[in-house]
Image (cartoon, rainbow, N blue to C red):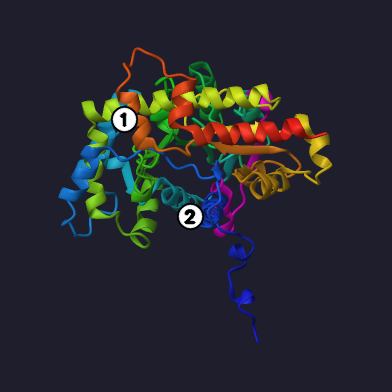
């Protein structure tokens, strides 16, 4: 008789729950037991959904009909206008798909597209497991700390030259500001990457979900420089604080309608359409307004100073990392402490994170979950474990012309700073 394990699809049997969700569950269990935990594991926006968007959801709660598989046309128009205003990109609403989170749309893309998938490492935790679920391979491109964990044009060109079927298009998944590293690309870097992609028949899936959270409000979309070959991924989860609402979008160029149509077929047989009330409310989010712009300005302001102050603590502690440029993550290398950590039988990123959770009550994610070699001592540390509603209220009371400082962070984001201090204190105590 077959066992239950044998009845599970072999593509899935070796997979575990998403690392980000798993670590959040462990943190909740510890907190239920009354333990003080420094949660740097889950990358969820700390900020509330803007009031105008919440009110819109409340007003449209009676909407109950199935909607178009691509999403409400009015919403797709609002998404198009949003990216024109923010990114100076002209998008056709007819070429936009709205899905239950950009995560689901990415999965559908991998189902619909049969060519090569190119993926820079480190990368978001779900890219590779999604590929494994449908039994396909991805080609990892290993980036370096010295290059700010960014894929260089030279590296991309080298990878393209090694492809077997160069005449067939491949998809490069580009994510910036990056999860797990918080880094972005300069105008010059984007132009050069666009040229390499154009010359080598590469479609770019540009995951710019953190774009509006560029700390200096200087986000540039690669679609500006490669409009004919870029699929732009966006959504509400990060900049609008609405992760649990599950709404994302893919915007396609005219020449990739064959891929958009294929994804719509799969969407029609899976999620059908995104929740109607959420879609109607999302129109308000993407249309924006002065209140939402104010919300975004202060969100960036808080994340910028908090990213700087936490990085300063870690750098002074002798760790390797770059100052973040967007989003809310540090990708930290503990390599300078390898010999001392080895005495505690900490020899890779997984054993490092397990030790910190058990002994320091610090929850963070190992670099191995982000497609880094297991032997590395890299760790993703989110800086979102604070009351975002309170922090925003306090930031609103301080003139935007005045910089926030360490005292603001210590008062309103204390748990985040203290978690980093706990790590450094522990490392300094090692012999």
Element class at badge 2: helix
Circle 1 residue: 393
- Residue 143 belongs to the span the image colors magenta: yes
**Disc number lying in front (2 or 1):** 1
The one of 292 and 218 positioned closer to us in this rendering? 292
The one of 102 and 88 positioned closer to us in this rendering? 102
The one of 325 and 351 positioned closer to us in this rendering? 351
Circle 2 residue: 111
Residue at the (33%, 46%) spot, across then down: 97
Q: Is residue 238 above or below residue 325?
A: below
Q: Is residue 369 above or below residue 292?
A: below
Residue 219 in the figure: left or right of residue 148:
left
Residue 5 in the figure: left or right of residue 187:
right
**Residue located farthest toward the top when viewing the structure as drawn:** 401
- Residue 134 belongs to the span the image colors magenta: yes
| Magenta extent | 124-147
**Disc on res. 352:** none
Q: Position of residue 44 (x, y in %)?
A: 45, 43
Q: Quadrant of the C terminus?
A: top right
Q: Is residue 228 above or below residue 169?
A: above
Label 2 CA crowd tier, 10 Å (few <14, some 14–19, many 20+): some
Asked whether residue 231 is in view, the answer is yes
Residue at the (59%, 28%) spot, across then down: 150
Spatial CA distance of label 2 from label 1 is 43 Å
């Amino acid at each position: 008789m077959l066992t239950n394990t044998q009845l599970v699809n072999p593509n899935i049997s070796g997979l575990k729950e998403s690392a980000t969700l798993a670590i959040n569950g462990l943190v909740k269990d510890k907190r239920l037991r009354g333990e003080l935990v420094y949660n740097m594991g889950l990358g969820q926006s700390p900020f509330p959904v803007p009031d105008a968007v919440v009110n819109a959801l409340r007003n449209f709660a009676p909407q109950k009909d199935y909607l178009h598989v691509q999403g409400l046309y009015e919403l797709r128009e609002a998404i198009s206008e949003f990216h024109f205003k923010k990114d100076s990109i002209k998008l056709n609403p007819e070429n936009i798909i709205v899905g239950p989170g950009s995560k689901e749309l990415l999965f559908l893309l991998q189902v619909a597209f049969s060519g090569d998938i190119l993926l820079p490492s480190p990368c978001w935790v779900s890219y590779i497991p999604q590929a494994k679920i449908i039994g396909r391979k991805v080609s990892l491109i290993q980036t370096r700390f010295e290059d700010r964990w960014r894929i260089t044009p030279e590296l991309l060109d080298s990878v393209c030259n090694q492809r077997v079927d160069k005449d067939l298009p491949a998809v490069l998944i580009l994510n910036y500001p990056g999860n797990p590293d918080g880094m972005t690309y300069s105008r010059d870097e984007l132009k050069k990457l666009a040229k390499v992609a154009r010359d080598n028949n590469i479609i770019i899936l540009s995951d710019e979900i953190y774009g509006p959270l560029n700390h200096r409000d200087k986000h540039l979309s690669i679609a500006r420089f490669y409009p004919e070959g870029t699929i732009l991924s966006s959504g509400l989860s990060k900049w609008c604080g609405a992760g649990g609402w599950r709404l994302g979008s893919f915007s396609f160029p005219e020449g990739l309608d064959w891929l958009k149509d294929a994804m719509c077929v799969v969407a029609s047989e899976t999620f059908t359409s995104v929740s109607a009330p959420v879609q109607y409310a999302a129109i308000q989010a993407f249309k924006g307004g002065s209140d939402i712009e104010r919300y975004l300005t202060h969100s960036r302001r808080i994340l910028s100073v908090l990213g700087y102050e936490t990085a300063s603590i870690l750098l002074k502690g002798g760790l390797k990392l770059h100052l973040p440029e967007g989003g809310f993550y540090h990708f930290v290398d503990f390599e300078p402490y390898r010999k001392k950590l080895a005495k505690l039988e900490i020899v890779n990123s997984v054993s490092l994170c397990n030790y910190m959770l058990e002994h320091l009550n610090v929850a963070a994610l190992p670099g191995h979950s982000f497609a880094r070699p297991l032997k590395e001592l890299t760790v993703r540390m989110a800086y979102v474990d604070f009351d975002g509603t309170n922090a925003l209220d306090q930031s609103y009371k301080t003139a935007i012309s005045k910089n926030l400082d360490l005292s603001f962070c210590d008062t309103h984001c204390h748990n985040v700073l203290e978690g980093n201090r706990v790590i450094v204190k522990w490392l300094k105590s090692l012999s």
